[in-house]
Amino acid sequence: MSERVVVALDVGGTGMKCALVRPDGVAVSTVRHPTDAARGPAAVVDTILDVAEGLADKARADGLTPIAVGIAVPGVVDEARGVAVWSANVGFRDVPLRDLAATRLGLPTALGHDVRAGGLAEARLGAGRGTGHVLFVAIGTGIAAAHVVDGAHVVGAHGAAGEIGHILVRPDGPRCGCGRPGCLEAVASASAIGRRYAELAGATADAPVTAAEVAERAAAGEPLASQVWQEAVEALADGLATGQALFDVATIVLGGGLAQAGDRLLTPLRAALHERMTFHREPRLVAAALGDEAGCLGAALLALDAVGVRNHQEKR
Ligand SMILES: [Zn+2]
């Protein structure tokens, strides 16, 4: 029998990361496509199905056997029913994406949430490997988390588990995209950090400043950048301490764009988290290891799980 692969897609607001992935977690063929969400959700769904079918055809042409499909999408995802319930940046409203893909490709299909899929990959193949209880926190334009226990991610009763970005950390803080003031992501997401710096810099601000630049300027000793960075670190520590009180994990894996700040984030954040631990056990705090491929690898793991093929690179 020819070598088996799964078709994996991670659909984001701007781009799709797609791959054929072997049961050992190695991507044998990787392609990227623009999502072009402005075309509307129906056109995005067509692209997803075309790309998935194209990858399955490529697998067969290369002498491989595609055995399942895994698709990760943002927003609220009902994984049990395979429905993309709601998404702000792709525009999905109750799209039965799992069944559409299964019908089109004639293969078992799993639908997952992008951050939970990324967390699954980090917990099983990446920075959380071998540690059992993992909280993956992705910090980018928003903040979301995935709680993974012994290689399985928690979905929630309504497909909305892990919204750690909407923990209230600063009651008098800026208004969040969800409508409430003071959510963690309104204070400490990469975009919130850039906004806060621009606001305090006022008329002296030059071009818009990214969170990465704030981190750099803070490291260079600029007082305003240091203040903004430390405010974000303290808010993140409050959010993670709440996460630890709820989940008591062994490892917190930080992903998303902000985690690329590396030790400029991790070192002060470890110290701030340490200060907040009373009787709770302090988790190991590490940066993600799989970069922006985590969501696609997680989609592959969902596909492998759906057909009962154990990924044999994992250690628990
Ligand atoms: Zn919120």
Image (tube, rainbow, N blue to C red):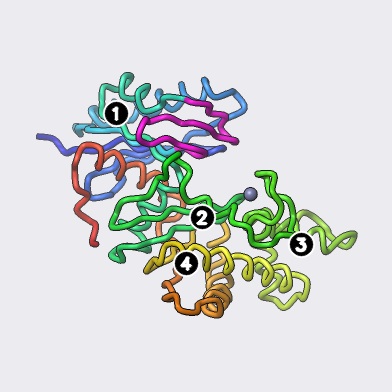
Which residue carries the number 1 mark?
56
Report helix, strand or loop for mark 1.
Answer: helix
Viewer-closest of 130 and 8: 130
When asked about the image quadrant of residue 308, the answer is: top left
Residue shown at the point (38%, 36%) measured from the top left: 79
Residue shown at the point (83%, 58%) measured from the top left: 206
Q: Quadrant of the C terminus?
A: bottom left
Tell which circle, 1 or 2, labels the residue nearer the N-terminal end.
1
Tell which circle, 1 or 4, labels the residue nearer the N-terminal end.
1
Q: Which of marks 1 and 3 is in front?
A: 3
Disc 1, ligand 1: is the CB inside 8 Å? Answer: no
Which residue carries the number 4 mark?
245
Q: Is residue 41 left or right of residue 153?
A: right
Q: Distance between the residues labelled 1 and 4?
A: 44 Å
| Magenta run includes residue 88 | yes
**Label 2 sits on what residue type?**
Ala
Q: Where is residue 85 in the image (x, y as percent from the top left)?
A: 49, 31
Which residue carries the number 3 mark?
197
Give the number of marks. Answer: 4
Q: In this view, does 235 lie to the left or right of 56?
A: right
Q: Which of marks 4 and 3 is in front?
A: 4
Which residue carries the number 2 mark?
138
Q: Nearer the viewer, mark 4 or mark 2?
A: 4
Q: How far apart are marks 4 and 2 (CA)?
A: 19 Å
